[in-house]
């Protein structure tokens, strides 16, 4: 058997070309090219014919050549803080839904809530000249904001509305989400309220929710009876440990607000093991409305966020480009569910 380096030109199967695709589809070369990129001005019928022809001859386009001529790739960059947090996996799912059929491709970078990693991820993505960039949050350091402000592409910041967006923004007011949950718990008759959270020094959105929650309590003549926070990653195990510590000191709490549903699930596990009735004796409240919440053996309160829709909308903004009169801010307020 010949090695690749030993093959001659006669041994090599001719690579399918765009001309082959156009000929088989019965369209012009230009139409075939635009159809493969998912251009809006090409009919659905033509796109389908071209795609079938391309698959038949095994055609693979040269995106690098297109990028060099256009000075821009078909990539949409997405920068998220975590892959282990299902919230951002669902955002990416929404991004993938919206990208499908557009001729564009999403790529992502993970920052681990580290501003230096975020800066490097954004810098690397911008070097590829993407069609647009989706970035989590509004609280980037100055050097990162300068990078984004200098980028001549649509920039969409997601998951937070409490701040100064660089270009477009899609998400929710984290401060208002915390305040709304506080008011809902007060209305439900809870008065001895505690808080459990993680990584508030890095997760600015969780920090804002706590701030809104505490402010709403204060406006209604209440304060947090006690709280426990750690710098550890946000997990059910950490939520369970912090809940045990908090209730060990404040056993009369009738409600605990957690930074998210993962932590709240840990709180549920502690209460069950300690024989504490949820929600009768103590109400557990989280944030995000993740799917597992509905499968817990007891009911908890949560704020159900629209994660996939946020991802989809961010891509739509990039596809619309930068134009006068195009809406650049979208609010997706969460729905409070008290269980």
Image (cartoon, rainbow, N blue to C red):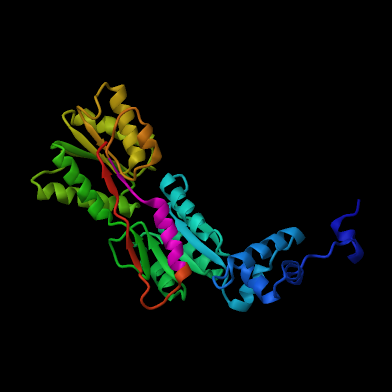
Q: In this rendering, would 293 be left or right of 111?
A: left
Identify the residue shown where x is 54% and y is 58%: 100
Q: Percent x, y for residue 260? A: 32, 43
Q: In which quadrant of the rendered view does residue 46 lie?
A: bottom right
Q: Quadrant of residue 66?
A: bottom right
Q: Quadrant of residue 167?
A: bottom left
Does residue 282 sit above or below 231 in this rendering?
Answer: above
Question: Taken as a whole, is the magenta stretch helix, strand or loop?
Answer: helix
x 31%, y 22%: residue = 273
Residues rendered magenta in the picture? 302-318
Percent x, y of residue 177: 25, 51
- Extreme residue in the left direction: 221
Of the pair 267 and 241, the residue shown nearer to us: 267
Q: Tell me if 220 is positioned left or right of 202 in this view.
A: left
* 308 or 286: nearer the viewer: 308
Asked if residue 87 shows in the view, the reply is yes
295, 167: nearer the viewer: 295
Q: Which image quarter holds the C terminus?
A: top left
Residue 214 percent coordinates (x, y): 18, 48
Total labels: the figure holds: 0
Q: Is residue 169 above or below residue 70?
A: above
């Amino acid at each position: 058997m010949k090695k690749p380096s030993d093959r001659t030109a006669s041994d090599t199967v001719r690579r399918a070309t765009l001309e082959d695709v156009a000929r088989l589809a019965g369209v012009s070369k230009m139409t075939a090219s635009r159809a493969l990129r998912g251009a809006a001005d090409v009919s659905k019928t033509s796109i389908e014919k071209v795609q079938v022809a391309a698959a038949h001859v095994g055609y693979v386009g040269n995106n690098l050549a297109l990028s060099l001529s256009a000075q821009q790739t078909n990539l949409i960059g997405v920068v998220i803080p975590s892959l282990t947090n299902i919230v951002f996996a669902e955002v990416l799912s929404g991004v993938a839904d919206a990208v499908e059929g557009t001729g564009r491709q999403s790529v992502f970078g993970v920052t681990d809530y580290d501003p230096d990693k975020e800066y490097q991820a954004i810098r690397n993505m911008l070097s590829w000249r993407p069609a647009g960039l989706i970035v989590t949050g509004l609280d980037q350091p100055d050097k990162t904001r300068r990078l984004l402000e200098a980028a001549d592409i649509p920039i969409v910041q997601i998951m937070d509305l409490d701040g100064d967006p660089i270009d477009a923004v899609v998400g929710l007011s984290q401060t208002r989400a915390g305040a709304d949950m506080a008011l809902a718990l007060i209305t439900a008759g809870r008065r001895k309220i505690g808080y459990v959270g993680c990584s508030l020094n890095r997760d600015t959105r969780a920090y804002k929710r706590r701030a809104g929650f505490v402010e709403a309590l204060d406006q209604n003549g209440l304060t947090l009876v006690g709280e426990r926070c750690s710098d550890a990653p946000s997990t059910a195990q950490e939520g369970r440990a912090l809940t045990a510590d908090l209730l060990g000191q404040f056993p009369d709490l009738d409600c605990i607000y957690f930074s998210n549903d993962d932590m709240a699930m840990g709180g549920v596990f502690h209460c069950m093991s300690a024989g504490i009735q949820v929600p009768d004796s103590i109400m557990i409240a989280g944030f995000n409305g993740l799917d597992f919440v509905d499968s817990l053996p007891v009911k908890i309160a949560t704020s159900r966020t629209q994660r996939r829709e946020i991802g989809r909308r961010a891509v739509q903004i990039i596809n619309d480009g930068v134009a006068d009169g195009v809406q650049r801010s979208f609010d997706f307020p969460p729905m409070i569910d008290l269980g």
